Amino acid sequence: MAPTHTPVLVREVIEALAVQPGGRYIDCTVGGGGHAIAILENSSPGGQLLGLDADPDAIVVARVRLKAYCETTLLRNENFANLLSIAEEHGFYPVNGILFDLGLSSFQLSSDARGFSFQRESALDMRLSPEQEATAEDIINQLPETELAHLIRTYGEETYSHKIAHRIVEERPIKTTLQLARTIELAVGGRRGKIHPATKTFQALRIVVNRELQYLEAGLEQALGLLGFGGRLVVISYHSLEDRIVKQFTQRESSDCICTPDIPVCICGHKASLSLVNKRVITPTADEVQLNPRSRSAKLRAAERITEWNNPTGVTNGQDSGLAGTMRFSEN
Ligand SMILES: C[S@@+](CC[C@H](N)C(=O)[O-])C[C@H]1O[C@@H](n2cnc3c(N)ncnc32)[C@H](O)[C@@H]1O
C-alpha cells in the first residue's frame, strides 16, 4: 500500500491563517498537499495558492492531490530559501497567509531509497533534492572526527556525540542507514528507553545535508516581506532547534526595540511588523496524537503582519497577481 501523509494540526492551521474566500496563500512545504487542499477549500471561491517543495517527488504527489484546483494553484519544485524570487516571478504578492510545515513527510520517511529512516536499509542519502551535491554518506565518511562530533552535538543535541563520532570513524566506510544505526548503538552501549540511540544523529545529518536551519531563517525573512497588512505567518516545527528559530524570529519582529538589555536607551530604531496571534505555542490534542503519533512533537506558532506592505521586490504591479484563470501546474 502506498504511504499516505496525514497533515498535522489542520484545523488549527486554517484558523491561524484566518483563511478567507478569495485569499492568496503560499504553502512553502506543500508535501502531500494535505494543508494545501484545506487552504484551497476554505478560501473558495477565488482562493489562490502557490505551493513549493524542495523535493520533486512531493510535487508529483501534490499535483495529483490538488488537481481539482489546477486553475488557481501553482506548484513549484523549489526551496523556500528562494521564496521571494519565486513570488516575484509570478507576481504573487502581497499574500494573506504563508505556511511552513517543516521537516519531512511520511512519504519521505518511509521511502526505501532516501535514507532518512534508521529503521530501513538504504543508502545514506538524506537529500531533499537530487540537485544537492553532498549526501549524508559524504559527511559521515569524510569529516574529521572532531567536526563530526561537533555536528552531532550541535544539530542533534546528542550528549554522546564524541563516543558516536569516534566509533563512526573506526567503522568507516559506512554506506547504509542500518550500518550507521548499528554503529551508533554500539557506541552508546546499546538501546535504553523508547528512543532509538540513532535518532539524534540522524536528525543532525538531515539538518546539515539540507541546510535546514539556514534555509528556515532565509525563508522566514522573505515571508515577512510578502505578507500584506493583516496577513498571517504560520509555522509548524518538529524539533527544538527549528522552533527556537521561529520563536526568536516572531519575537524579534513583534518587538519595537531589539537592543541588548545592557543598552539603557533604544538605539536600534527597530519597529514591530508582526503581532503574535497566540502567546503560547499550539500543540496537537491528545486525540490527534493518538490518531497520528507523528504529530506529537509539533509546535505551531502564528503571527500577523501589522504594518503596511512594502513591495520587497521593487516590482510595482504586485497588487494584482493576475492569476485567476491563468495559472497552471508548473512542470518545473
Ligand atoms: C511535513 S512535510 C509537509 C506536509 C504537508 N504540509 C502536507 O500536508 O502534506 C514537509 C515538506 O517540506 C519539504 N521541505 C523541507 N524543507 C524545505 C525547504 N527548505 N524548501 C522547500 N520544501 C522543503 C519537504 O520536502 C516535505 O515535503
Image (cartoon, rainbow, N blue to C red):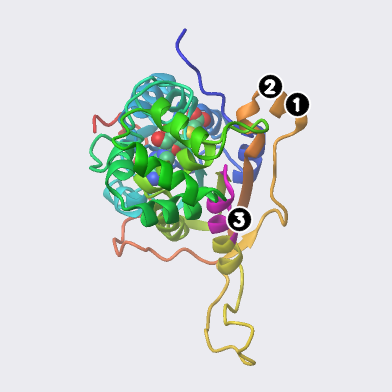
What type is the residue that disc 1 sits on? Answer: Asp
Circles 1, 2 touching at the beta carbon (< 8 Å): yes
SS class, disc 2: helix
What type is the residue that disc 2 sits on? Answer: Leu
Q: Which-is-in-front pick, marks 1 and 3?
A: 1
Tell me if residue 72 is in the magenta stretch: no
Q: CA distance from mark 1 to mark 3?
A: 26 Å
- Which residue position holds label 2? 291
In the figure, residue 285 lies in which quadrant?
Answer: top right
The part of the chain drawn in magenta is: 237-247
Q: CA distance from mark 2 to mark 3?
A: 28 Å
| Left-right relation of 325 to 131 | right
- Which residue position holds label 1? 287
- Which residue position holds label 3? 303
For the residue pair 22 and 192, the one nearer the viewer reads as 192
Indicate the position of residue 205 as horizontal and vertical percent values: 41, 43
For the residue pair 208 and 254, the one nearer the viewer reads as 208
Q: Residue furthest bottom?
A: 264
Circles 1, 3 touching at the beta carbon (< 8 Å): no
